[in-house]
Amino acid sequence: MKFSLIAVLVVALAIGSESASLVKREAPAELDKIAKYFQDLVDNLKNVEGPELANKASAYFEESRAQLQPMVEKLQEQLKPLSSNIEDHLKPLAASVQAQVAPLAGMVQSQVEDVLKFVADQTKAMLPPQ
């Protein structure tokens, strides 16, 4: 908000300095309109209170959401075939990887079980007899 206000003031000052350089020449009507627009904008921003500004911001976001919602829905519709196409390609790949990893996982599991059995046996051997 402060940045916008500063930007508006800089533009207004630039227009004002441009107008000052046209001392003896007549400023175009468009330049006057732009200067008046920015001056009115600055005046309105000065008069805006905190809650009112929050309400205006909320209304702006709601309006933007309403404008963007159709575009988002259209984009989602366009991406659905692509996502299903990607899914169709990934399912066989995932099945292939799982088929290759399953035997390795079984081997790792059996080795871990063997190590745990060995550790348990060694622990029992180190304990004094009861």
Image (cartoon, grey):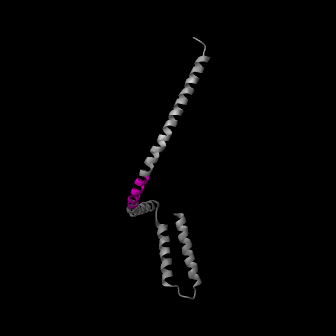
Counting the numbered discs, the total is 0
| Residue 103 among those drawn in magenta | no
Q: Quadrant of residue 118?
A: top right
Residue 76 image offset from top left, x and y in percent: 40, 58
Look at the magenta stretch and give its main secondary structure.
helix
| Vertical side of 81 occupied by 123: above or below | above
Q: Is residue 31 left or right of residue 123?
A: left
Q: Of residues 125 and 103, which is closer to you in this image?
A: 103
| Vertical side of 78 occupied by 29: above or below | below
At x 48% / y 67%, what residue is drawn? 45
Q: Is residue 121 left or right of residue 54?
A: right
Residue 109 image offset from top left, x and y in percent: 52, 32
Q: Of residues 125 and 5, which is closer to you in this image?
A: 125
At x 59% / y 12%, what residue is drawn? 129
Residue 56 image offset from top left, x and y in percent: 43, 63
Residue 35 image offset from top left, x and y in percent: 51, 77
Which quarter of the figure is the C terminus placed in?
Answer: top right
| Residue 77 among those drawn in magenta | yes
Q: Quadrant of residue 119?
A: top right
At x 52% / y 66%, what residue is drawn? 4
Q: Of residues 71 and 79, which is closer to you in this image?
A: 79
Q: Give the magenta-colored segment's residue range.
A: 73-86
